[in-house]
Image (spheres, rainbow, N blue to C red):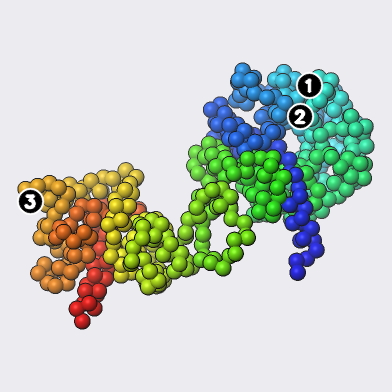
Amino acid sequence: MMPVKKCYIRDSLKNNKCLILDNSLRESPVGQLRGHTLENKWKIYNEVKKVGFKNIIVASFNHMTRVEDVFIEELKERGEDFSKFWAFSELVESFDPDGRPNIKKVPVGLRKCKQMGIKNVIIEFDLVYPAIDYNIFTNKIITDLLVKRLKWVRENLASDSKILFNFRDFPKAMATKQKDVLKIVKTVANLAKTKRPFGFIYEDPFGNWLPDEIGEFTAIVRNEMNNADWKNGHLLAHIHEQYSLADSTQLECLANGATGIWASLSKVGAFLGHASSSVTLMNLIRFGNKHVLNKYNCTHLRTAAQAVTEITTGIRPDNMQPVYGDRALDTVFGLDYIDGKEFSMAKFFGVEPVMRITTEASTGMIIKQLIKLFGENSQFNESIALNMKEKMLEDLKNNRKEEYMSPVGLAMLFDRSGGKLTPEMCAVITQVEVTEDHHKILMKEVKEEWDEWDVQDGVQDDKVNYDAFYNGFMSVYFSCYRCEETTKALKALDMDGNGQIDWNEFALYLKWALRQYPEIDTRDKLIDISFRKGLIPAMQDEIIQSSTEYK
């Protein structure tokens, strides 16, 4: 039986309505080598809109004019709904060298919000920052200033402004000055309902704390808010990554009283990134949460997170990134025992999962993938699938590291395992493009040599007879053209049995070699590896099979 606490956590996650305060426009460029251009911001903004997030952080203002200042002006020109936009502001404009705060001056963030027409504000402050003298900047001064800022915002931005206070150093403050944290929470929570802010947000800025620790701190603050009858007050979490605990910590926060998160769709951000909204929401969905399904367009989460990552970094997400990495939906084992009740992320996103063909794949998976890629064929049976598994193990024992998931890789494995390449295999493989420039040059060099042998029969038709192919390419590896083994080996390449070798039949092995051994840098190496690693093993299978049939 599942422990009581774990049952509670699952139920809590299932029922959490999870407000998303989207930070894709601000979080993702932090700490990156390349910031966002104006075009980048529009692309990201459009992805956020497609997911359906209604609260979007668009700026963190300072004295300089940033790209986001221009972006906000364009948002105005295009008539976007400013009621859903948020911006960051400091609680205090500045501190003197002795740690004394300048509390009289309204911070530039708030002033720019007024200038730009942003009415929803996140006001940030610290409780354990080393450069601040908290004997001067006392807890009472902080609390009074928070209330003062509330009043200023509603008088200068909008009477219905939504305001969040951010405990920027939340875990350390809770661990060392918990009473001070709770005094602030209690004072704000006990304001008249019409004067309260939208809620509190907090963060673990360095990802140093354990999920249970942040979860407990969250529960303590939530309890303080509830005791003041502020159950509808929001409490949003933001967890940075450092030790691979960010996503777990964020879920722990939601299970212990956080009403949502502030995060980017993509994990990309400061330090090693942060717990993204896409991964968190998918965890809630797999636990049966219907609230988020109704609030957001969750089927677009994967595509949106991929787009935000690529727009920000210039490259696609890591293949192994959960939820939105290219391999996140792969099927690894032949889990034929599943009764269909388990959550399928691939099915949720409307994507057929990729069968990951490895030594762990079942024979059923191998057969299914063969049929999927190359169509029905009598050769695709239990026997050949078993041979293919054995060949994969043999490759590993021989320190030969291959891939078997691509059409080329799977076809070559099939060929080397005793199968005979089908016309459908050849048709699929010839469509595979060689993309690297230096690989294209090598293919061109081999093709030029091929063409010299091709025209010897008076017709250039991308076909050469056995004699020409042997003399042009094969003689180095088979010393006797008239020998029976050589004849049988040539038949292994003649896939359509017309007595000739087609360029596409030969190019199949060349493309495979380039894909599998990208370090190939000369025409001679390309031909050599194509023969030794691909053609000769396939020819040997043909020779063995023919000898067996003869006996």
Closer to us: 439 or 79 = 79
SS of the residue under disc 2: strand
State the residue in front, 400 or 339: 339
Q: Is residue 278 above or below residue 78?
A: below
* Residue, disc 1: 157
Label 2 CA crowd tier, 10 Å (few <14, some 14–19, many 20+): many
Residue depicted at 67% across the width and 44% down the height: 293
**How busy is the neighbourhood of tag 3: few (under 14 within 10 Å), some, or many (20 plus)?**
few
Query: Which image quarter is the C terminus in?
Result: bottom left
Q: Residue at x 62, y 33 (%)?
A: 49
Gap in angstroms between the C-alphas marked 2 and 1: 9 Å
Q: Is mark 3 in CB contact (under 8 Å) with mark 1?
A: no
Q: Is residue 59 left or right of residue 486?
A: right
> Height in image: 354 above or below 417?
above
In which image quadrant can residue 379 be found?
A: bottom left
Q: Are marks 2 and 1 in contact (CB under 8 Å)?
A: yes
Task: Report if the CB atoms under discs 3 and 2 are less than 8 Å apart.
Answer: no
Q: Quadrant of the N terminus?
A: bottom right
Q: Amino acid at mark 3?
A: Gln
Dot 1, how many residues are within 10 Å of its Cα: few (below 14), some (14-19), or many (20+)? many
Q: Position of residue 367 (x, y in %)?
A: 41, 64
Task: Estimate the spatial distance between the alpha carbons at disc 3 and disc 2, rounded to whole Å.
Answer: 79 Å
The residue that label 2 is drawn on is: 121
The reply to whether residue 511 is visible in this rendering is no
Q: Secondary structure at mark 3?
A: helix
- Label 1, secondary structure: give it: loop
**Residue corresponding to mark 3:** 456
Image spot of residue 15 (x, y percent): 76, 50
Return the x and y of residue 187 as percentages of the image width and height: 92, 37
Label 3, label 1: how far apart the Cα atoms are = 84 Å
